[in-house]
Image (tube, grey):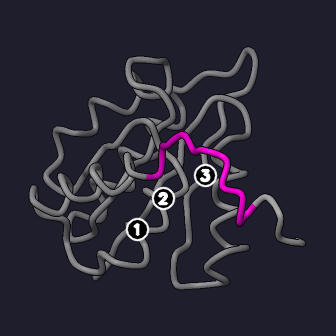
Amino acid sequence: MDRQIVLASHGRLAEGLADTYKMIAGETDNDFIVFTLNYGGDTKDFAEELRKQIEDQPEREFVILCDIYGASVYSALYPLKRYANVQLFTGMNLPLLLTLCLEYRTKLTQEDITRLIDQSRQGIQTTEINEEVENEDF
């Protein structure tokens, strides 16, 4: 499967996510494109550069993970959804990235996308104090 994963965020979240992924999963075949929007930056140039890559590689699946639905990074990349080889997720988190890279090795289907989102949401939880864990030495 030929897939390009794009991590796009405000600030350095995308960089941190890529770094944390490599810390947990090790160096893998996944070579991420990382976009960080800094103060005063513009998303247009990045979106245009990515559009060219998508058009030049129609056989390659581009999976874009953005930080916030409706925000400037998402809004700049959303038009790329018109290409059949693009999937766009928002609310990116580490469980989403790990599951995508380690469990889904073929072109994503709508069923895969639904499962990915459900699995990623399971990583968001609140916990209760557990005396067994509280008393263990770390």
For the residue pair 83 and 116, the one nearer the viewer reads as 116
Q: Is residue 40 magenta?
A: no
* Mark 2 residue element: helix
Instruction: Identify residue type, mark 2.
Output: Pro
Give the numbered dot on residue 95. Answer: 2
The Cα–Cα distance between marks 2 and 1, rounded to whole angstroms, is 6 Å
Comparing labels 2 and 3, the label whose residue is closer to the camera: 2
Mark 2 / mark 3, whichever is N-terminal: 3
- Total labels drawn: 3
Q: What's the magenta region?
A: 123-133
Q: Dot 2, how many residues are within 10 Å of its Cα: few (below 14), some (14-19), or many (20+)? A: some
- The residue tagged 1 is 99
Q: Position of residue 69 (x, y in %)?
A: 39, 24
Q: Is the stretch drawn in magenta largely helix, strand or loop? A: loop
The Cα–Cα distance between marks 2 and 3, rounded to whole angstroms, is 17 Å
* Mark 1 residue element: helix
Q: Position of residue 13 (x, y in %)?
A: 67, 41
The residue depicted at 43 percent of the width and 73 percent of the height is 101
Q: Is residue 75 left or right of residue 115?
A: right
Q: Is residue 124 magenta?
A: yes
Give the numbered dot on residue 40. Answer: none
